[in-house]
């Protein structure tokens, strides 16, 4: 039997007191698509950084095609034949596609352009080599990353959560590319927490939990529930209960809003129309970068319109287009932004002080001064009611894990008892347990009569909690679809956009 | 007409200290490092160049020494800002003041002394043209400075080295993930900037006004810094901005000499006003700023 492509024995890595990887064993065979399955924080990314030479292990050994190796830099790993596509792309926006590729591939520009076109045709990775990266869609950027890896002739390609940024149709296309690569002898390490995808494409899966391997299986022999149990160590939490309800008054209305953002790389919005009632959840589906950030800023009040266009945003019965975020919050609006650190919370400030940022409306001030006792009490209630795992209200926000901080921020906003709640990417980078808790809370808000607007990239999440879905693609919002009547594919069709003709 | 040919003949030489210093700073900033110590590096280069030339070392040795002095001072800046990751603004200001202090110290016994400038080269035909002929009567450094402008543009735009410098400036973390030694590249860019600042100082002290006076750089380093930003980090615009500044400085001199009835302080501030207005207008293009601006400028980077 030939030596496996990559064999890892007893690999460990700690950051301070956190054991990110504990004695990991992993074997990747030639011509295999091998999944690394685990929740956020299970140690998947650390393991990949160790293999790719971004970080060096504390203990353990790596064997590459039978020889012991110890890559200490990505350049060395690439020389061995290991390529990696990062989850957050490592492309340079102000450079063109061919310039980005020339950074790691030697050769004349014209020759590189020709090779990029050839690889694009061969593997279904078409992209314009002369285009600037900032003008590309997320799917196109991923193709550039993959092409960049392929041009170094890798034997092993590591893909970190490659589908998290893609609409469903592009996922199918990516899978075709990956199968074609495998058939030509490239092994693939496929990092994901999406069980169905792993069952669809991988022939092997190594499951990580809390930094350690909890199993290595053939995912095709197990159903999603079994894989999930291995991944989270207990049974999957059930989805939140659906409840019949009657929508009330209109809480938010945009009637054909056009907007050109100040940022020249931003996505202009065109004729955005939506109407959200009290007692319902409206989901905005679509891949980030299609106007999500711009729409969020217009609704939250971070970006305001001139006076004469105030009526283009109607919130809780009032024209608010020219009002700032604070004025909108005074009407009974609350907002959980996409970026937790820096927008949702100030990382260097304590949880108590972060509560005050929006919670001062809930009686935490006395004659203009902060009432510290009430502030601490209010924060403690938020921590308790929303199951935030933290030493206490004095902890710095930046010290919390993503999931816990998100529970805290969502809790802080819900405690304000808003009539209109807007949450952008509610469970992005949040573990399953916390995600389920957050979704239940949003549903409970709806059932209590509030209007909830959710922007999310996770279609499954939107199908789970929303009453209606609209899709934001290339700055245009699709018509409203009632979740009961549609399937995931219907949403996917709008995500690609009728006008683009499947180019994304 | 006499005024115009006076301006045309002198503007390139007047622009040279700004141009050389700004080109060096542009390279440093493109790699993501903001070096506010340019003024001090010019001052140190000026005194070094002057002293060497004064003692008979010749202009070539003077320029060489000045460049090395500027680079040495920028090495201290780079060590503090890049290796120790100190705040670039604070370190840049401190190093700048250090350079000006050293310049005053070394130059103390040379106050008001002079050296010979560089001869102006006469080109056949071109130099004899009416009105514009003066443009082609320049010293050798002017021609070398123009060649350097073209070379720096070509390196940044057309070569892999330039690509790497731009990549490091936009996203150092990604550049490192690709295997590039970000800190070493920034050291190189900063020291190139120091070298150019030193040369700019030597030009000011031994060619443009070949006379030593303490504080003779007189804010030219700051103008160079401003030129880089106003020029949206583009080499061609730095060149244009430096020449505009040189031309307007000469224009106001010509106006004063010609007896234009205007407050002389107002005239003296004209170069600053015109440069700010013109470059301010062309740098208001947000798209250009985003394309050429340096995303990681001034931010410390390290493991």
Image (tube, coloured by chain):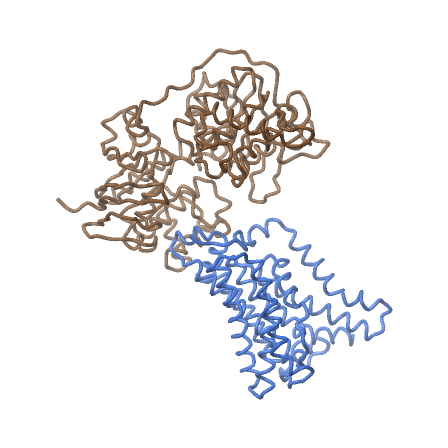
Could you tell whether A223 is left or right of B3 in the image? left
Chain A's colour is: brown
When asked about the image quadrant of residue A19, the answer is: top left
The answer to whether residue A497 is visible is no
When asked about the image quadrant of residue A277, the answer is: top right
Quadrant housing the C terminus of chain A? top left
- Residue B56: % across, % down: 58, 88
As drawn, the residue found furthest toward the right would be B261
As drawn, the residue found furthest toward the front would be A373
Query: Relative to the observer, which residue lies in front, B107 or A47?
Result: B107
Q: Residue at x 38, y 57 (%)?
A: A111
Residue A166, compared with residue B200, is above or below; it is: above
Q: Residue at x 32, y 54 (%)?
A: A72
Q: How many marks?
A: 0
Quadrant housing the N terminus of chain A? top left
- Residue A63: % across, % down: 22, 49
In the image, the chain rendered in blue is B
Residue A291, compared with residue A60, is above or below; it is: above
Query: Relative to the observer, which residue lies in front, B68 or B281?
Result: B68
- Residue A201: % across, % down: 29, 33
Query: Relative to the observer, which residue lies in front, B213 or B164?
Result: B213
As drawn, the residue found furthest toward the bottom would be B56
Query: Relative to the observer, which residue lies in front, A245 or A124?
Result: A245
Residue A447, compared with residue A28, is above or below; it is: above
When asked about the image quadrant of residue A127, the answer is: top left
- Residue B69: % across, % down: 53, 74
The answer to whether residue B119 is visible is yes
Could you tell whether A22 is left or right of B53 in the image? left
């Amino acid at each position: 039997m030939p030596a496996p492509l990559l064999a890892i024995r007893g690999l460990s890595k700690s950051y301070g007191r956190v054991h990110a990887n504990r004695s990991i064993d992993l074997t990747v065979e030639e011509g295999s698509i091998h999944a690394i399955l685990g929740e956020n924080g299970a140690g998947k990314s650390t393991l990949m950084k160790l293999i790719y030479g971004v970080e060096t292990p504390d203990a353990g050994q790596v064997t590459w095609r039978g020889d012991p190796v110890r890559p200490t830099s990505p350049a060395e790993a690439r020389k061995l034949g290991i390529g990696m596509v990062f989850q957050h792309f490592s492309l340079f926006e102000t450079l063109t596609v061919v310039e980005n590729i020339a950074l790691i591939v030697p050769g004349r520009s014209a020759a590189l352009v020709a090779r990029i076109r050839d690889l694009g045709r061969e593997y279904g990775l078409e992209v314009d080599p002369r285009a600037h990266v900032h003008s590309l869609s997320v799917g196109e950027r991923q193709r550039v990353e993959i092409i960049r890896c392929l041009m170094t002739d890798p034997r092993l390609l590591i893909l970190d959560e490659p589908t998290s940024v893609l609409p469903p149709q592009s996922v199918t296309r990516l899978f075709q590319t990956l199968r074609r690569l495998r058939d030509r002898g490239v092994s693939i390490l496929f990092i994901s927490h999406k069980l169905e995808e792993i069952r669809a494409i991988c022939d092997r899966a190594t499951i990580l939990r809390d930094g350690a391997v909890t199993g290595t299986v053939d995912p095709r022999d197990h159903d999603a529930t079994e894989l999930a149990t291995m991944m989270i160590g207990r049974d999957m939490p059930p989805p939140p209960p659906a409840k019949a309800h009657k929508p009330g008054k209109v809480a938010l209305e945009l009637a054909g809003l056009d907007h050109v953002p100040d940022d020249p790389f931003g996505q202009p919005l065109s004729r955005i129309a939506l109407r959200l009632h009290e007692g319902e959840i409206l989901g905005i589906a679509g891949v980030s970068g299609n106007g999500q950030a711009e729409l969020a800023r217009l609704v939250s009040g971070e970006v305001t319109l001139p006076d004469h266009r105030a009526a283009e945003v109607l919130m809780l019965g009032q024209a608010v287009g020219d009002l700032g975020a604070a004025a909108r919050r005074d009407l009974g609006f609350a907002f959980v932004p996409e970026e937790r650190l820096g927008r949702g919370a100030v990382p260097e400030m304590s949880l108590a002080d972060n509560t005050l940022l929006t919670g001062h409306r809930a009686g935490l001030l006395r004659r203009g001064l902060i009432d510290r006792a009430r502030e601490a009490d209010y924060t403690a209630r938020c921590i308790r009611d929303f199951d935030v795992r933290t030493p206490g209200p004095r902890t710095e926000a930046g010290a919390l894990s993503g999931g816990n901080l998100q529970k805290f921020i969502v809790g802080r906003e819900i405690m304000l008892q808003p009539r209109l709640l807007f949450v952008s990417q509610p469970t992005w980078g949040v573990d399953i347990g916390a995600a389920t808790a957050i979704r239940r809370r949003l549903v409970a808000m709806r059932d209590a009569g509030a209007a909830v607007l959710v922007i999310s990239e996770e279609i499954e999440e939107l199908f789970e909690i929303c009453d209606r879905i609209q899709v934001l693609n290339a700055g245009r919002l699709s018509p409203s679809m009632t979740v009961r009547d549609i399937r995931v594919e219907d949403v996917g069709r709008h995500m690609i956009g009728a006008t683009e003709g499947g180019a994304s | 007409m006499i005024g115009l040919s006076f301006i045309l003949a002198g503007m390139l030489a007047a622009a040279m200290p700004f141009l050389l210093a700004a080109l060096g700073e542009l390279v440093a900033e493109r790699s993501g490092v903001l070096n506010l110590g340019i003024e001090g590096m010019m001052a140190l280069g000026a005194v070094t160049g002057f002293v060497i030339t004064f003692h008979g070392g010749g202009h070539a040795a003077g320029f060489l020494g000045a460049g090395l002095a500027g680079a040495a001072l920028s090495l201290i800046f780079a060590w503090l800002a890049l290796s120790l990751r100190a705040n670039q603004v604070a370190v840049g200001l401190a190093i700048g003041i250090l350079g000006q202090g050293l310049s005053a110290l070394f130059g103390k016994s040379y106050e008001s002394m002079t050296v010979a400038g560089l001869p102006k080269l006469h080109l056949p035909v071109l130099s004899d043209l009416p009105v514009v002929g003066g443009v082609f009567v320049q010293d050798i450094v002017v021609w070398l400075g123009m060649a350097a402008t073209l070379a720096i543009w070509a390196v940044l735009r057309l070569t892999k080295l330039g690509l790497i410098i731009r990549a490091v400036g936009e996203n150092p973390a990604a550049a490192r993930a690709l295997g590039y030694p970000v800190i070493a590249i920034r050291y190189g860019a900063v020291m190139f900037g120091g070298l150019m600042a030193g040369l700019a100082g030597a030009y000011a002290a031994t060619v443009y006004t070949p006379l030593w006076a303490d504080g003779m750089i007189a804010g030219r380093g700051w103008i160079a810094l401003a030129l880089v930003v106003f020029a949206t980090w583009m080499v061609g615009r730095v060149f244009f901005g430096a020449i505009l500044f040189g031309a307007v400085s000469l224009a106001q001199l010509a106006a004063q000499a010609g007896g234009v009835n205007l407050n002389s302080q107002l005239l003296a501030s004209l170069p600053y006003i015109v440069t700010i207005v013109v470059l301010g207008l062309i740098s208001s293009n947000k798209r250009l700023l985003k394309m050429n601006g340096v995303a990681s400028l001034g931010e410390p980077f390290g493991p």
